[in-house]
Image: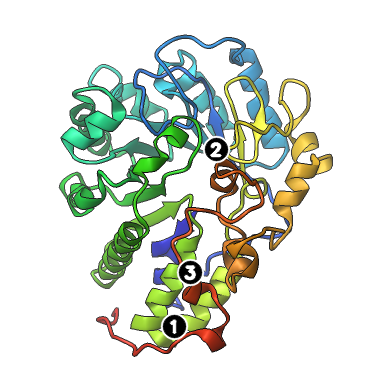
Amino acid sequence: MLRISHYLRALAHPDAAPVPGARGTPGQRPPVVIWNLLRRCNLTCKHCYATSADSPFRNELDTDEALRVIDDLADAGVRVLILSGGEPLLRPDLFQLADHARQRGFFVALSSNGTLIDDSNIERVAAAQFDYVGISIDGLQDVHDAWRQKKGSFAAALHAVGLCRRHDIRVGLRSTLTQHNYPQLSAILALMRDYDVHKFYLSHLNYSGRGKRSSKFDAHHQMTRSALHLLFERAWADIGAGLDTDFVTGNNDADAILLLRWVQRHMPQHGPRLEAMLRAWGGNASGSGIANIDNTGDVHPDTYWWQHQVGNVRRQSFRELWIDRPQPLLAQLRQHPRAVSGRCAACRWLPICNGNTRTRAWAAGDLWGEDPGCYLSDEEISPPARQARTPAATVQPVG
Protein backbone atom coordinates (compact mmCIF):
# COMPACT_ATOMS: atom_id res chain seq x y z
CA MET A 1 0.00 0.00 0.00
CA LEU A 2 1.36 3.38 -1.05
CA ARG A 3 0.32 6.27 1.21
CA ILE A 4 0.56 9.05 -1.36
CA SER A 5 -0.67 11.89 0.85
CA HIS A 6 1.52 10.79 3.73
CA TYR A 7 4.69 11.00 1.64
CA LEU A 8 3.78 14.24 -0.09
CA ARG A 9 2.82 15.83 3.22
CA ALA A 10 6.21 14.81 4.62
CA LEU A 11 7.85 16.64 1.70
CA ALA A 12 5.67 19.73 1.97
CA HIS A 13 5.99 20.09 5.74
CA PRO A 14 9.18 18.27 6.78
CA ASP A 15 9.18 19.75 10.28
CA ALA A 16 5.50 19.11 11.00
CA ALA A 17 4.66 15.83 9.27
CA PRO A 18 5.98 12.54 10.68
CA VAL A 19 8.33 10.69 8.37
CA PRO A 20 6.73 7.43 7.16
CA GLY A 21 8.22 4.49 9.02
CA ALA A 22 10.56 1.83 7.66
CA ARG A 23 9.46 -1.76 7.18
CA GLY A 24 11.51 -3.14 10.10
CA THR A 25 12.84 -6.68 10.36
CA PRO A 26 10.72 -8.98 8.16
CA GLY A 27 8.65 -11.38 10.25
CA GLN A 28 9.29 -9.53 13.50
CA ARG A 29 7.01 -6.53 12.98
CA PRO A 30 3.39 -7.54 13.71
CA PRO A 31 1.43 -7.38 10.44
CA VAL A 32 -1.79 -5.66 9.57
CA VAL A 33 -4.33 -8.50 9.56
CA ILE A 34 -7.18 -8.57 7.07
CA TRP A 35 -9.73 -11.10 8.28
CA ASN A 36 -12.44 -12.53 6.03
CA LEU A 37 -14.93 -13.30 8.78
CA LEU A 38 -17.21 -15.10 6.36
CA ARG A 39 -17.39 -15.81 2.66
CA ARG A 40 -21.08 -15.15 2.14
CA CYS A 41 -21.99 -11.91 0.38
CA ASN A 42 -25.18 -10.37 -0.94
CA LEU A 43 -23.29 -9.38 -4.13
CA THR A 44 -21.33 -11.38 -6.71
CA CYS A 45 -18.77 -8.83 -7.87
CA LYS A 46 -16.80 -9.57 -11.02
CA HIS A 47 -13.47 -8.85 -9.32
CA CYS A 48 -14.08 -10.70 -6.03
CA TYR A 49 -10.91 -12.46 -4.87
CA ALA A 50 -12.93 -14.64 -2.45
CA THR A 51 -15.41 -15.81 -5.12
CA SER A 52 -18.19 -15.05 -2.65
CA ALA A 53 -21.88 -15.78 -3.19
CA ASP A 54 -25.13 -15.33 -1.29
CA SER A 55 -25.11 -18.75 0.34
CA PRO A 56 -23.64 -20.28 3.50
CA PHE A 57 -20.12 -21.72 3.38
CA ARG A 58 -18.99 -24.68 5.45
CA ASN A 59 -16.46 -24.93 8.24
CA GLU A 60 -16.30 -21.23 9.10
CA LEU A 61 -14.97 -20.13 12.48
CA ASP A 62 -17.74 -19.85 15.05
CA THR A 63 -18.07 -17.06 17.61
CA ASP A 64 -16.01 -18.72 20.34
CA GLU A 65 -13.24 -19.57 17.88
CA ALA A 66 -13.25 -16.03 16.48
CA LEU A 67 -13.04 -14.48 19.95
CA ARG A 68 -10.08 -16.72 20.72
CA VAL A 69 -8.38 -15.66 17.49
CA ILE A 70 -8.73 -12.01 18.49
CA ASP A 71 -7.01 -12.75 21.80
CA ASP A 72 -4.38 -14.76 19.94
CA LEU A 73 -3.65 -11.88 17.57
CA ALA A 74 -3.40 -9.44 20.47
CA ASP A 75 -0.90 -11.74 22.20
CA ALA A 76 1.15 -11.81 18.97
CA GLY A 77 1.38 -8.02 18.98
CA VAL A 78 -1.03 -7.34 16.10
CA ARG A 79 -2.60 -3.91 16.45
CA VAL A 80 -4.49 -3.30 13.19
CA LEU A 81 -7.42 -5.55 12.31
CA ILE A 82 -9.55 -5.14 9.19
CA LEU A 83 -12.84 -7.05 9.31
CA SER A 84 -13.87 -8.12 5.83
CA GLY A 85 -15.81 -10.82 3.99
CA GLY A 86 -17.82 -11.63 1.90
CA GLU A 87 -19.95 -8.98 3.44
CA PRO A 88 -19.13 -8.80 7.17
CA LEU A 89 -22.53 -7.32 8.05
CA LEU A 90 -24.08 -10.69 7.18
CA ARG A 91 -22.29 -12.23 10.16
CA PRO A 92 -24.62 -12.05 13.21
CA ASP A 93 -21.78 -11.73 15.72
CA LEU A 94 -19.93 -8.96 13.85
CA PHE A 95 -20.50 -6.32 16.49
CA GLN A 96 -19.62 -8.70 19.32
CA LEU A 97 -16.30 -9.45 17.62
CA ALA A 98 -15.65 -5.78 16.87
CA ASP A 99 -16.37 -4.82 20.48
CA HIS A 100 -13.99 -7.48 21.76
CA ALA A 101 -11.26 -6.36 19.36
CA ARG A 102 -11.65 -2.76 20.43
CA GLN A 103 -11.43 -3.78 24.10
CA ARG A 104 -8.17 -5.58 23.31
CA GLY A 105 -6.74 -2.35 21.93
CA PHE A 106 -6.95 -2.95 18.18
CA PHE A 107 -7.41 -0.33 15.51
CA VAL A 108 -10.56 -1.89 14.03
CA ALA A 109 -11.66 -1.20 10.46
CA LEU A 110 -14.71 -2.48 8.62
CA SER A 111 -14.51 -3.35 4.92
CA SER A 112 -18.00 -3.37 3.39
CA ASN A 113 -19.79 -3.07 0.08
CA GLY A 114 -22.07 -0.63 1.91
CA THR A 115 -25.38 -1.98 0.67
CA LEU A 116 -26.40 -3.37 4.08
CA ILE A 117 -25.64 -0.21 6.06
CA ASP A 118 -29.00 1.54 6.29
CA ASP A 119 -31.31 3.41 8.62
CA SER A 120 -32.15 0.22 10.52
CA ASN A 121 -28.60 -0.46 11.73
CA ILE A 122 -26.61 2.77 11.40
CA GLU A 123 -26.94 3.46 15.15
CA ARG A 124 -25.38 0.06 15.88
CA VAL A 125 -22.62 0.64 13.33
CA ALA A 126 -21.86 3.98 14.98
CA ALA A 127 -21.91 2.42 18.47
CA ALA A 128 -19.28 -0.11 17.35
CA GLN A 129 -16.81 2.79 17.11
CA PHE A 130 -14.99 1.46 14.06
CA ASP A 131 -11.84 3.46 13.51
CA TYR A 132 -12.53 3.40 9.79
CA VAL A 133 -15.23 2.09 7.44
CA GLY A 134 -14.22 1.43 3.84
CA ILE A 135 -17.05 1.36 1.28
CA SER A 136 -16.52 0.31 -2.32
CA ILE A 137 -17.49 2.57 -5.22
CA ASP A 138 -16.32 1.02 -8.48
CA GLY A 139 -17.64 3.63 -10.88
CA LEU A 140 -20.76 5.69 -11.33
CA GLN A 141 -24.14 4.03 -11.22
CA ASP A 142 -24.20 1.93 -14.41
CA VAL A 143 -20.57 0.79 -14.18
CA HIS A 144 -20.70 0.12 -10.43
CA ASP A 145 -23.95 -1.84 -10.65
CA ALA A 146 -22.61 -3.87 -13.61
CA TRP A 147 -19.39 -4.83 -11.79
CA ARG A 148 -21.23 -5.52 -8.54
CA GLN A 149 -23.86 -7.41 -10.56
CA LYS A 150 -26.77 -5.89 -8.67
CA LYS A 151 -28.95 -3.01 -9.77
CA GLY A 152 -29.26 -0.37 -7.09
CA SER A 153 -26.01 -1.27 -5.33
CA PHE A 154 -24.45 2.10 -6.22
CA ALA A 155 -27.30 4.08 -4.70
CA ALA A 156 -27.30 1.87 -1.60
CA ALA A 157 -23.55 2.24 -1.10
CA LEU A 158 -23.70 6.03 -1.41
CA HIS A 159 -26.63 6.12 1.01
CA ALA A 160 -24.42 4.21 3.47
CA VAL A 161 -21.60 6.72 2.98
CA GLY A 162 -23.96 9.58 3.76
CA LEU A 163 -25.36 7.84 6.85
CA CYS A 164 -21.88 7.13 8.18
CA ARG A 165 -20.72 10.71 7.73
CA ARG A 166 -23.84 12.07 9.42
CA HIS A 167 -22.97 9.82 12.38
CA ASP A 168 -19.38 11.10 12.37
CA ILE A 169 -17.92 7.76 11.25
CA ARG A 170 -14.63 8.05 9.38
CA VAL A 171 -15.27 6.69 5.89
CA GLY A 172 -13.13 5.95 2.88
CA LEU A 173 -14.15 5.31 -0.72
CA ARG A 174 -12.45 2.35 -2.41
CA SER A 175 -12.28 1.73 -6.15
CA THR A 176 -10.66 -1.01 -8.19
CA LEU A 177 -9.29 0.51 -11.39
CA THR A 178 -10.56 -1.04 -14.64
CA GLN A 179 -11.04 -0.01 -18.25
CA HIS A 180 -14.68 0.69 -17.44
CA ASN A 181 -14.33 3.09 -14.52
CA TYR A 182 -11.11 4.82 -15.61
CA PRO A 183 -13.03 7.55 -17.53
CA GLN A 184 -15.12 8.16 -14.38
CA LEU A 185 -12.28 8.59 -11.90
CA SER A 186 -12.60 12.37 -11.68
CA ALA A 187 -16.32 12.03 -11.00
CA ILE A 188 -15.66 9.38 -8.34
CA LEU A 189 -13.17 11.70 -6.65
CA ALA A 190 -15.79 14.44 -6.73
CA LEU A 191 -17.95 12.25 -4.52
CA MET A 192 -15.37 12.78 -1.78
CA ARG A 193 -16.29 16.47 -1.71
CA ASP A 194 -20.02 15.81 -2.05
CA TYR A 195 -20.07 13.38 0.90
CA ASP A 196 -17.34 14.92 3.06
CA VAL A 197 -15.13 11.83 2.70
CA HIS A 198 -11.46 12.28 3.53
CA LYS A 199 -9.91 9.05 2.27
CA PHE A 200 -9.72 7.47 -1.17
CA TYR A 201 -8.15 4.08 -1.85
CA LEU A 202 -7.43 3.06 -5.43
CA SER A 203 -6.81 -0.66 -5.84
CA HIS A 204 -5.25 -2.16 -8.93
CA LEU A 205 -6.94 -5.29 -10.23
CA ASN A 206 -5.38 -8.43 -8.83
CA TYR A 207 -5.81 -11.63 -10.81
CA SER A 208 -7.30 -13.77 -8.05
CA GLY A 209 -10.71 -15.39 -7.63
CA ARG A 210 -13.20 -13.89 -10.08
CA GLY A 211 -10.62 -11.13 -10.59
CA LYS A 212 -8.55 -13.63 -12.57
CA ARG A 213 -11.41 -14.15 -15.01
CA SER A 214 -11.84 -10.36 -15.27
CA SER A 215 -8.15 -9.65 -15.92
CA LYS A 216 -8.95 -8.81 -19.56
CA PHE A 217 -10.73 -5.72 -18.23
CA ASP A 218 -7.69 -4.51 -16.29
CA ALA A 219 -6.80 -0.90 -17.01
CA HIS A 220 -4.27 -0.48 -19.81
CA HIS A 221 -0.87 0.72 -18.65
CA GLN A 222 -1.33 4.25 -19.97
CA MET A 223 -4.73 4.46 -18.27
CA THR A 224 -3.10 3.41 -15.02
CA ARG A 225 -0.38 6.02 -15.29
CA SER A 226 -2.89 8.74 -16.08
CA ALA A 227 -5.07 7.73 -13.12
CA LEU A 228 -2.09 7.80 -10.78
CA HIS A 229 -1.00 11.23 -11.99
CA LEU A 230 -4.51 12.49 -11.25
CA LEU A 231 -4.24 11.18 -7.68
CA PHE A 232 -0.78 12.74 -7.22
CA GLU A 233 -2.04 16.10 -8.43
CA ARG A 234 -5.19 15.94 -6.29
CA ALA A 235 -3.24 14.92 -3.18
CA TRP A 236 -0.69 17.71 -3.67
CA ALA A 237 -3.39 20.31 -4.31
CA ASP A 238 -5.27 19.27 -1.17
CA ILE A 239 -2.10 19.57 0.90
CA GLY A 240 -1.59 23.08 -0.46
CA ALA A 241 -5.19 23.93 0.45
CA GLY A 242 -4.73 22.61 3.98
CA LEU A 243 -7.23 19.76 3.51
CA ASP A 244 -6.87 16.62 5.63
CA THR A 245 -7.42 14.15 2.79
CA ASP A 246 -5.68 10.83 2.37
CA PHE A 247 -5.01 9.26 -1.03
CA VAL A 248 -3.75 5.67 -1.03
CA THR A 249 -3.14 3.00 -3.66
CA GLY A 250 -2.71 -0.73 -3.34
CA ASN A 251 -1.78 -3.89 -5.25
CA ASN A 252 0.79 -2.31 -7.54
CA ASP A 253 4.03 -1.23 -5.91
CA ALA A 254 5.24 0.32 -9.16
CA ASP A 255 3.09 3.24 -8.00
CA ALA A 256 5.93 4.25 -5.67
CA ILE A 257 8.35 4.64 -8.57
CA LEU A 258 5.81 6.58 -10.59
CA LEU A 259 5.32 8.90 -7.59
CA LEU A 260 9.08 9.33 -7.32
CA ARG A 261 9.38 10.20 -11.01
CA TRP A 262 6.48 12.66 -10.69
CA VAL A 263 8.21 14.39 -7.78
CA GLN A 264 11.58 14.37 -9.58
CA ARG A 265 9.97 16.06 -12.56
CA HIS A 266 7.84 18.62 -10.74
CA MET A 267 9.80 19.16 -7.51
CA PRO A 268 13.33 17.88 -8.12
CA GLN A 269 14.59 19.34 -4.84
CA HIS A 270 12.43 16.78 -2.99
CA GLY A 271 13.47 13.77 -5.07
CA PRO A 272 16.37 12.52 -2.91
CA ARG A 273 14.33 12.68 0.30
CA LEU A 274 11.37 10.86 -1.20
CA GLU A 275 13.62 8.17 -2.68
CA ALA A 276 15.19 7.61 0.74
CA MET A 277 11.75 7.27 2.35
CA LEU A 278 10.55 4.86 -0.33
CA ARG A 279 13.66 2.71 0.03
CA ALA A 280 13.03 2.56 3.78
CA TRP A 281 9.42 1.57 3.08
CA GLY A 282 10.58 -1.27 0.85
CA GLY A 283 7.56 -2.03 -1.29
CA ASN A 284 5.36 -5.10 -1.33
CA ALA A 285 4.87 -6.50 2.17
CA SER A 286 2.80 -9.64 1.51
CA GLY A 287 3.81 -12.26 4.03
CA SER A 288 5.59 -9.69 6.17
CA GLY A 289 3.67 -6.51 6.95
CA ILE A 290 0.36 -7.95 5.70
CA ALA A 291 -1.41 -11.17 6.70
CA ASN A 292 -4.79 -12.61 5.86
CA ILE A 293 -7.05 -14.99 7.77
CA ASP A 294 -9.86 -16.51 5.74
CA ASN A 295 -13.28 -17.66 6.89
CA THR A 296 -12.07 -21.17 7.81
CA GLY A 297 -9.01 -19.98 9.74
CA ASP A 298 -6.43 -20.58 7.03
CA VAL A 299 -3.69 -17.94 7.04
CA HIS A 300 -2.34 -16.46 3.79
CA PRO A 301 0.40 -13.96 2.90
CA ASP A 302 -2.35 -11.51 1.91
CA THR A 303 -5.96 -11.59 0.74
CA TYR A 304 -5.10 -12.56 -2.84
CA TRP A 305 -3.11 -15.68 -1.86
CA TRP A 306 -5.94 -18.10 -1.12
CA GLN A 307 -4.21 -20.71 -3.29
CA HIS A 308 -1.37 -20.83 -0.70
CA GLN A 309 -1.82 -21.43 3.04
CA VAL A 310 0.89 -20.88 5.65
CA GLY A 311 -1.02 -22.32 8.61
CA ASN A 312 -4.39 -22.34 10.33
CA VAL A 313 -5.35 -20.49 13.51
CA ARG A 314 -7.47 -23.45 14.64
CA ARG A 315 -4.37 -25.63 14.86
CA GLN A 316 -1.60 -23.13 15.71
CA SER A 317 -1.27 -19.81 17.43
CA PHE A 318 -0.77 -16.92 15.06
CA ARG A 319 2.54 -16.10 16.70
CA GLU A 320 3.81 -19.63 16.11
CA LEU A 321 2.89 -19.83 12.41
CA TRP A 322 3.81 -16.23 11.56
CA ILE A 323 6.79 -15.40 13.80
CA ASP A 324 8.22 -18.43 15.61
CA ARG A 325 8.02 -21.17 12.96
CA PRO A 326 7.05 -19.66 9.60
CA GLN A 327 6.80 -21.83 6.50
CA PRO A 328 9.48 -21.53 3.77
CA LEU A 329 7.09 -19.53 1.57
CA LEU A 330 7.04 -16.73 4.15
CA ALA A 331 10.82 -16.77 4.33
CA GLN A 332 10.96 -16.37 0.54
CA LEU A 333 8.49 -13.50 0.58
CA ARG A 334 10.40 -11.80 3.41
CA GLN A 335 13.66 -11.79 1.50
CA HIS A 336 14.39 -8.20 0.55
CA PRO A 337 14.71 -7.64 -2.25
CA ARG A 338 13.03 -10.84 -3.37
CA ALA A 339 14.63 -13.39 -5.68
CA VAL A 340 12.49 -12.66 -8.74
CA SER A 341 13.15 -13.11 -12.45
CA GLY A 342 12.44 -11.42 -15.78
CA ARG A 343 12.11 -7.64 -15.89
CA CYS A 344 11.74 -7.55 -12.10
CA ALA A 345 15.21 -9.06 -11.56
CA ALA A 346 16.88 -6.44 -13.76
CA CYS A 347 14.87 -3.48 -12.45
CA ARG A 348 16.86 -0.72 -10.77
CA TRP A 349 13.87 -0.09 -8.49
CA LEU A 350 13.58 -3.61 -7.08
CA PRO A 351 14.65 -2.46 -3.56
CA ILE A 352 11.72 -0.03 -3.57
CA CYS A 353 9.06 -2.18 -5.26
CA ASN A 354 10.24 -5.59 -3.92
CA GLY A 355 8.95 -7.46 -6.95
CA ASN A 356 5.43 -6.06 -6.86
CA THR A 357 2.42 -8.38 -6.63
CA ARG A 358 3.36 -12.04 -6.78
CA THR A 359 -0.19 -13.28 -7.32
CA ARG A 360 -0.34 -11.59 -10.74
CA ALA A 361 2.95 -13.25 -11.62
CA TRP A 362 1.52 -16.58 -10.41
CA ALA A 363 -1.59 -16.07 -12.57
CA ALA A 364 0.78 -15.59 -15.53
CA GLY A 365 2.46 -18.92 -14.77
CA ASP A 366 5.48 -18.19 -12.54
CA LEU A 367 5.16 -17.20 -8.90
CA TRP A 368 8.64 -15.62 -8.96
CA GLY A 369 8.47 -14.26 -12.49
CA GLU A 370 7.89 -10.68 -13.53
CA ASP A 371 4.63 -8.98 -12.58
CA PRO A 372 2.55 -8.44 -15.75
CA GLY A 373 0.83 -5.55 -14.00
CA CYS A 374 4.00 -3.42 -13.96
CA TYR A 375 3.40 -0.46 -16.25
CA LEU A 376 6.94 0.99 -16.11
CA SER A 377 8.84 1.05 -19.40
CA ASP A 378 12.18 -0.66 -19.99
CA GLU A 379 13.79 2.78 -20.09
CA GLU A 380 12.31 3.70 -16.71
CA ILE A 381 13.60 0.59 -14.96
CA SER A 382 17.05 0.59 -16.59
CA PRO A 383 20.20 1.92 -14.87
CA PRO A 384 20.56 5.73 -14.91
CA ALA A 385 23.23 5.81 -17.61
CA ARG A 386 20.77 4.46 -20.18
CA GLN A 387 18.04 6.98 -19.39
CA ALA A 388 17.49 10.15 -21.37
CA ARG A 389 17.24 13.37 -19.43
CA THR A 390 13.92 15.20 -19.47
CA PRO A 391 13.45 18.86 -18.59
CA ALA A 392 11.88 19.51 -15.21
CA ALA A 393 8.47 21.10 -14.95
CA THR A 394 7.15 22.94 -11.95
CA VAL A 395 4.02 22.80 -9.82
CA GLN A 396 2.66 25.31 -7.38
CA PRO A 397 4.61 24.99 -4.12
CA VAL A 398 2.79 24.26 -0.88
CA GLY A 399 2.63 26.93 1.80
Indicate the secondary structure of the residue bearing disc 3: helix
In the rendered image of this protein, does residue 393 appear above or below residue 59? below
Between marks 2 and 1, how big is the CA–CA gap? 34 Å
Quarter residue 370 falls in: bottom right
126 or 29: nearer the viewer: 29
Image coords of residue 324 (percent x, y):
83, 41
222 or 54: nearer the viewer: 222
Image coords of residue 374 (percent x, y):
48, 59
Horizontal side, residue 44 vs residue 371: left or right: left
Q: Give the colouring mode of the picture.
A: rainbow
Between marks 3 and 1, how big is the CA–CA gap? 14 Å
Residue at the image point whose x is 74% and y is 30% from the top: 311
- Dot in front, 3 or 1: 3
Q: Is residue 85 visible?
A: yes
Residue at the image point whose x is 55% and y is 69% from the top: 278
Between marks 3 and 2, how big is the CA–CA gap? 23 Å
Horizontal side, residue 265 vs residue 152: left or right: right
152 or 366: nearer the viewer: 366
Quarter residue 237 falls in: bottom left
In the rendered image of this protein, does residue 89 appear above or below residue 287? above
Q: Which residue has dot 2 on it?
A: 304
Q: Which mark is residue 257?
A: 3
Whether the residues at callouts 3 and 1 have beta carbons within 8 Å, the answer is no
Q: Earlier in the sequence, mark 3 or mark 2?
A: 3
Q: Which residue has dot 1 on it?
A: 270
206 or 317: nearer the viewer: 206
Q: Amino acid at mark 2?
A: Tyr
